[in-house]
Image (cartoon, rainbow, N blue to C red):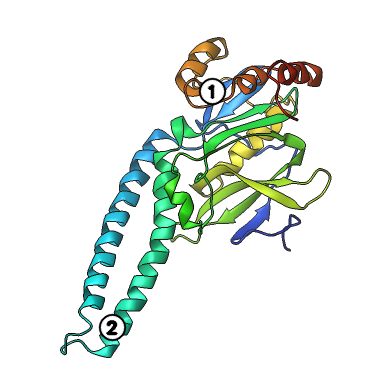
Amino acid sequence: MPSKYRPQLLGWIGDLEKGKNYLTSSEKRLIYMNDNYCAFIRQTFADQIFYFFIYLLAILLGCGAIYTGLLLVMEYDNPNMENYLLIATIIGLIFCLVGMNTIIPGFYHVLFSRRGSPIIFNRKTGKVYVNESYFFSFRFWYNPLVFLHPNKRRIKEYDWADLHGVAIHNYSPYSLVSDILMVCKPGTNQTIDHIMFDPARIGVGSHLIWGWVNNYMIFDKLADTSRSIYPTDQEDKFKQKIINGQGWPKWMIEAFNATTQDELADIKQKYQVKQ
């Protein structure tokens, strides 16, 4: 049975149910929560270090392969170079260039995913806040021109009602699964944007976080609130360590704790935020 969200993502495994969920755990990703909002990091520091060196090695090997291939192409006039070797070299160069178009975004992904790329869920206003690298995504192809803007970021406010979870396979030999938030037009299943909810994980680990967030957003007690990295009474410390200096707009930081739609509207009016 195909996904009900269109267009369907490549590698789709299944749609995730929204609402009360008994498959739940914060999985050590819950960095802060209080009665108004919670914050989840989507990439641990250990993962960033590991993938940083993996991608760096891949870039060095790719550059070496491209350099070698270009030297061979320049040697085409050499009588000892057969045509089949030239064709094989050109094909290899094409594959290397395509591969670099995947590797470089991955490198930017880990290099500019600041402090775990937290995602904020306000359950009283039903808003979700994202501040992340443009390359923090699951796409395989980017316009090469965007590589010239490695610090490009996406900072947006979303309605929780318009976000729906799906699980996708990344086709690795380790059966890794990623959970993606499909941003749909209000009241429809037509997707207009995507958010990386939880990057590649083994098994159903990310589904546990999906369940926790769903329970939290409906004020269900199954959302265990005792395991956040920063306790509720350390909000200032959480913001100092994770939020401050990361480009979050002042109005958005204030909106984290908004308790009603009217209060949120007042905050936006105060900072002259365009609706």
Nearest the eye: 116 or 19 = 116
The N terminus lies in quadrant: bottom right
Number of the label disc, if any, that sits on residue 86:
2
- Per the model, the C-alpha gap separating discs 1 and 2 is 59 Å
Q: Is residue 113 left or right of residue 267?
A: left
Q: Write the residue at 51% across / 57% down.
A: 143
The C terminus lies in quadrant: top right
* Percent position of residue 157, x then y: 67, 32
- Note whether 183 is above or below 209 in the view shown: below
Which quadrant of the figure has residue 84? bottom left
First-in-chain label (1 vs 2): 2
Q: Is residue 194 left or right of residue 32?
A: right
Crowding near the residue tagged with mark 1, few <14, some 14–19, many ≥20 C-alpha atoms within 10 Å: some
Q: Write the residue at 73% across / 57% down.
A: 6
Nearest the eye: 238 or 69 = 69
Nearest the eye: 121 or 92 = 92
Number of the label disc, if any, that sits on residue 204:
none
Which element type, helix, strand or loop, lies under badge 2?
helix
Q: Amino acid at mark 2?
A: Leu
* Percent position of residue 229, x then y: 49, 22
* Percent position of residue 94, x then y: 38, 72
- Note whether 218 is above or below 144 in the view shown: above
Which element type, helix, strand or loop, lies under badge 1?
loop
Q: Is residue 186 left or right of residue 99?
A: right
Q: Which residue is mark 1?
A: 227
Crowding near the residue tagged with mark 2, few <14, some 14–19, many ≥20 C-alpha atoms within 10 Å: some
Q: Write the residue at 30% across / 46% down.
A: 53
Q: Amino acid at mark 1?
A: Arg
Q: Is residue 239 left or right of residue 165?
A: left
* Percent position of residue 131, x then y: 56, 33
